[in-house]
């Protein structure tokens, strides 16, 4: 590579990054870099601090190596020079000892989402414990669990709970200084202040808080220098009994962070937010539908909740899609519409092959009747009814012709099967007990 080419390659790199990042990110991370020297085989960059050097190598190594000269080991051949600190001009306004310093809130502050409150958070067995811990912290900040560490998979309500704590404290203690921040924003804040040589001011600001809410701490992993500053802030606050709440996608012990920080995070209470069970998912669907004025029958809510089960954000997305569709088409919601609009969102657990035989066995144990009676022709209600349930399930779960299925029921006709299916489908609209029995039988079949 010729020297001129190296220079050109650096501009190309910057152009590439400019297209990839937000203007704010570009301004923070890339504008401060100065190109000092180029040669055919290397490039010298001046950076304001070690953080920037680390950031560049950690996040853009592939782009750097593809455009710039490389060393024999494949690393980009960059010599970094850390910019010498400028001498501070002594100004008359510099604070004297003991003088109150006005602290600026961080540039990257996160506003609390007004929808994320405790009253909008639907409770169920998977999140009861963590919700009551969050309520406890909000009622007695700094005095119950400190820190409170909330972990769980994506879209399960961690941020929602974090903001709920913030709202609750702001309402009941308006004088408390509450700061909610994502880990990404904390890092950006630190970089911004390093650049502007105002880290001391930033430290003072964070250490003057009463409540610090930190979202998604997993983003601090492998950011060694930032981790140390976070840990110092953390300790300073906890030592003054200031409340800290942290969310993460993993429990502390599984995070790739220093032992010191992990131990600190385990000091208080570690609580998990889990995947909501079927009933809670149904309650969430009703809640979200009510909020946007979508009419949702119990049967359709169950149908959606049975197929979308991993994540509350997806449930919310499903309701929004259905509402948009029904609004546009001016129609009521039906199961067919749900299937066609949400089909690709539906999650299917790989199923065991379901046969009439296995259905008969499950129904027989659920309703406590013998398989041979289900196959027989007794019209006694305690036998005929479970038989109709078995026929309903067979038509729902087995994709073979009705004639073939009905013949496996001891030679019944396909119109008997159809009649049973219709009867049970109708009864399901109003009979909660039957719905539960059928759900359990299905679960049993698929387990
Ligand atoms: P996470 O931070 O765990 O990824 P969020 O808190 O962003 O998840 O939740 C995703 C969406 O689901 C949000 O809109 C939130 O309001 C909603 N949500 C999650 N759990 C619940 C719940 N239990 N009740 C009501 N809404 C919930
Ligand atoms: Mg979140």
Image (cartoon, rainbow, N blue to C red):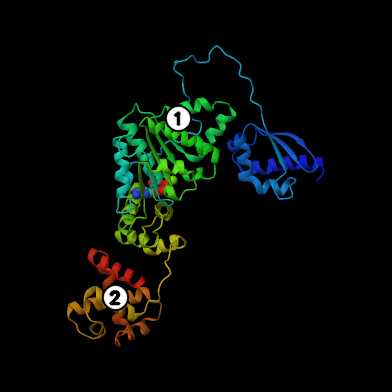
Q: Quadrant of ligand 2?
A: top left
Question: Going by the image, does 333 lie left or right of 85?
Answer: left
Which residue is under mark 1? Answer: 206
- In the image, the residue with mark 1 has its CB under 8 Å from the nearest atom of ligand 2: no
Where, by quadrant of the figure, is residue 35 drawn?
top right
Q: Quadrant of residue 233?
A: top left
What residue sits 61% from the left and 19% below the top? 88
Q: Earlier in the sequence, mark 1 or mark 2?
A: 1
The 10 Å Cα crowd at callout 2, few under 14, some 14 to 19, many 20 or more, is many
- In the rendered image, residue 353, in percent from the top left (x then y), is placed at 40, 76
* Residue shown at the point (30%, 38%) measured from the top left: 144
**Real-space Cα distance between discs 1 and 2?**
60 Å
Position in image of residue 76 (x %, y %): 70, 45
Residue 293 seen in this snapshot: no
Q: How many marks can you see? A: 2
The local secondary structure at tag 2 comes to helix
- Name the disc covering residue 351, or none: none
* Viewer-closest of 217 and 104: 217
Q: Is residue 51 above or below residue 349?
A: above
Would you say 276 lies left or right of 98 here?
left
Q: 147 or 429, which is in the foreground?
A: 147
Residue that sits furthest to the top in the current view: 92
Question: What number is the disc on residue 362?
Answer: 2
Expressed as whole percent of the image width and height from the top left, the position of residue 7 reads 77, 39
């Amino acid at each position: 590579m010729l020297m001129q080419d190296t220079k050109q390659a650096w501009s190309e790199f910057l152009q590439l990054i400019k297209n990839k990042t937000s203007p704010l990110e570009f301004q923070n991370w890339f504008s401060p870099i100065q190109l000092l020297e180029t040669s055919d085989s290397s490039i010298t960059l001046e950076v304001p601090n070690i953080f920037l050097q680390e950031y560049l190598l950690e996040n853009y190594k592939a782009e750097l190596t593809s455009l710039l000269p490389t060393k024999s080991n494949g690393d980009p051949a960059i010599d970094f020079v850390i910019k010498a600190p400028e001498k501070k001009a002594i100004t008359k306004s510099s604070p004297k000892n003991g003088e109150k310093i006005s602290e600026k809130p961080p540039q990257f502050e996160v506003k609390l989402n007004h929808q994320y409150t405790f009253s909008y958070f639907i409770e169920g067995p998977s999140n009861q414990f963590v919700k009551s811990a969050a309520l406890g912290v909000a009622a007695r900040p700094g005095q119950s669990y400190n820190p409170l560490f909330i972990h769980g998979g994506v879209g399960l309500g961690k941020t929602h709970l974090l903001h709920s704590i913030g709202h609750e404290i702001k309402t009941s203690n308006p004088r408390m200084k509450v700061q909610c921040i994502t880990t990404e924003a904390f890092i950006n804040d630190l970089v911004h202040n390093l650049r502007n040589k105002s880290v001391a001011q930033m430290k003072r600001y964070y250490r003057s808080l009463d409540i610090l809410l930190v979202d998604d701490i997993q983003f601090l992993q492998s950011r060694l220098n930032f981790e140390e500053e976070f840990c110092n802030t953390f300790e300073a606050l906890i030592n003054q009994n200031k409340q800290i709440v942290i969310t993460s996608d993993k429990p502390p012990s599984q995070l790739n962070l220093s032992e010191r920080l992990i131990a600190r995070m385990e000091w208080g209470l570690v609580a998990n937010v889990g995947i909501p069970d079927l009933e809670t998912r149904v309650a969430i669907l009703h809640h979200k539908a009510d909020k946007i004025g979508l009419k949702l029958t119990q049967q359709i809510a169950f149908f959606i909740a049975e197929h979308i089960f991993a994540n509350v954000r997806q449930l919310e997305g499903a309701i929004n899609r259905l509402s948009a569709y029904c609004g546009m088409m001016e129609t009521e919601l039906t199961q067919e519409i749900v299937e066609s609009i949400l089909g690709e969102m539906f999650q299917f657990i790989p199923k065991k092959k379901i046969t009439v035989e296995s259905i008969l066995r499950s129904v027989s144990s659920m309703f406590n009747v013998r398989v041979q009676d289900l196959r027989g022709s007794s019209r006694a209600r305690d036998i005929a009814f479970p038989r109709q349930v078995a026929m309903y399930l067979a038509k729902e779960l087995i994709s073979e012709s009705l004639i073939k299925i009905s013949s496996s029921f001891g030679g019944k006709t396909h119109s008997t099967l159809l009649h049973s299916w219709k009867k049970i489908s109708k009864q399901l609209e109003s009979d909660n007990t039957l719905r539960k029995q059928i759900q359990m039988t299905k679960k049993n079949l698929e387990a």
